[in-house]
Amino acid sequence: MPEISTAVAEVKHRYLWGTFLLMTTSRRWLFNVGYCVLLTPVGLAVILVALHTLGTINAWVFPIVQVGVFCLFGGSSCLVAAQLADRRPAQRSADRQRRWLGWGLAMLLVINVPTYGLAYHMTHVRVPGQLGIGAPKPRNAKTPLDRGLSYATRTIPINASQWLETWEISAQASAPKGIVLLFPGNLGTKSSQLISPAQTFSSLGFDTVLGDFQGVVGSSGSTVTLGIDESEDVVTVYNYWQEQMVAQGRGDTPIILYGVSMGTAAILRAIATHKITPDAIILELPFVRLVDAVKSRLRHHKIPPNPTAALMVFWAGIQHGVNGFGHNPISYAKAVDCPTLVIHGAQDKWTPVSEIEALVNNIPVSKQLIVSPEAGHHQLIGVDRALWDASVSNFLKAI
C-alpha cells in the first residue's frame, strides 16, 4: 500500500540520518578530545613554569613526564578511534588535512606503544608473584661456600629506603695485597657472574667484595638503567670501602674495580662522571654505545633496529629521567687515569672487536687488551680459565 511504503521510507530515512548525525558527532567529539589531550602537556607546562617562577609550587615534584606519556597515548587513541569511525571519503581540503594529521598521529601511537613497552620490560624487574611486565628479579642460585670460600654478607645503605647487598671474601694470604670490588652485568648477580673471578682474586692475595646492583637479588629497587644509575652504586661501594680501609689503618691499600658487561659501563661512568679514583680497573665484555648495544640485540631477535633502538632508548630515558643517548662508555674511557685491563671475546655477537679496540685507544694511560678467539659474550673465565687467570695475574703484578 502506498501509505505504508511512504511511512517505511520515512522511518528508514530518519534512522539513517540519525545514525549519520551520531557518527559525525562522535567523530568530531573524538577528534576534539584527541587534539585537546595531546596539547594538554604544553599548557600544563606553561602553567607550572609560571607558578614555579612565582614561588607558588615546586614544579619539579609534579609528575609532568607521566602526565605527558598518558596524554600522548590517550590523545592518539582518540584520533585512531575517530579515524575508524570516519567511513566517508574526505571531500574538502580541510577534511583531508585533518584526516592525514590524524593518521600521522595514529601512526605515532602504533610505533611508540610497543617500543615504550619494550623499554619498560628491559628496564624493570618483578618480584615473584608480582603482576605486570618486566623481567623476574634475579635470585642467587649458589654461594661462595659451594667453591669452598668462606664469606660474609653485608648491606651497604644508600639512604633510608635503599641499600646494596654484598658478599665479602677474605684473601688467601695473611697480608692482603689490596681489595677488588666486583660488579655484574645486566640482570647478572654476584652468584652467577662473580664467584669464579673472586676465587682467582682471593688466591692471588686480594680481599674481594661481590656487589649486586639495585634491582637484583638482595639489593633494593626494581629498575635497571644499563649502567647509568648503576654507576652511583659503584660510587657507593667504592666510597664505603675507601672509608673502611682508612678506618682500619689501611688507607694506602690498592682498590681495584672489576666489571662484566653493564658493570664495565657503570665503572667507566663512575670514573668519568663521579670522579672516583681506583688504583686499577678490569673491564670484561664492555659495550661501546648504548644505542648500538640495543641495536645489536634487536637484530639478534629479528626486530628492525631502526628506528626501534632509538625509540627504546628515548622512552627508557623518559621512564627513568636519564639520557641514554649520552651513555657511551667509549667517551667515558677518556677520563680513565689508572692501569686498565680489557678482556673481550672475538665471537662476541653484541660488540665487535674493532669497537673494543676503539674504546681501548681512548684510554689515555697504561692499558692492555686480551681477546680470546673462542669466547663470545661470555666471561673468559668460563671458556679458558687458564688464559683468564694468567692475564689477570700478570696485570695485577704490574700495578
Image (spheres, grey):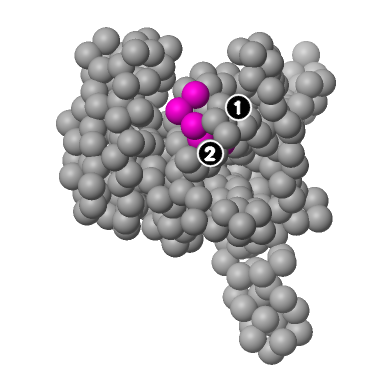
Q: Is residue 36 visible?
A: no
Q: Position of residue 316 (x, y in %)?
A: 53, 43
Question: Looking at the image, is 217 positioned above or below residue 329?
Answer: above
Q: Earlier in the sequence, mark 1 or mark 2?
A: 2
Q: Which mark is residue 84?
A: none
Q: What's the mark number on residue 176?
A: 2
Within 10 Å of disc 2 (Cα), the crowding (few <14, some 14-19, many 20+) is some
The front one of 127 and 339 is: 339
Asked whether 125 or 103 is in front, the reply is 125
Quarter of the figure that contains the C terminus: top left
Instruction: Decide if residue 49 is on the left or right side of residue 393.
Output: right
Q: Which mark's residue is nearer the viewer, 1 or 2?
A: 2
Give yes or no for residue 361 being in the magenta stretch: no
The kind of residue tagged 2 is: Pro
Q: Which residues are magenta?
A: 203-207
Quarter of the image where the N terminus is located: top right
x, y (%) of residue 226? 49, 39
Residue found 72% across the figure and 47% down from its top: 156
Mark linked to residue 190: 1
* Residue 282 in sight in this render: yes
For label 1, the SS is: helix
Pick the front one: 253 or 162: 253
Residue in the image at 38% along x and 13% along y: 385
| Cα–Cα gap, marks 1 and 2 | 21 Å
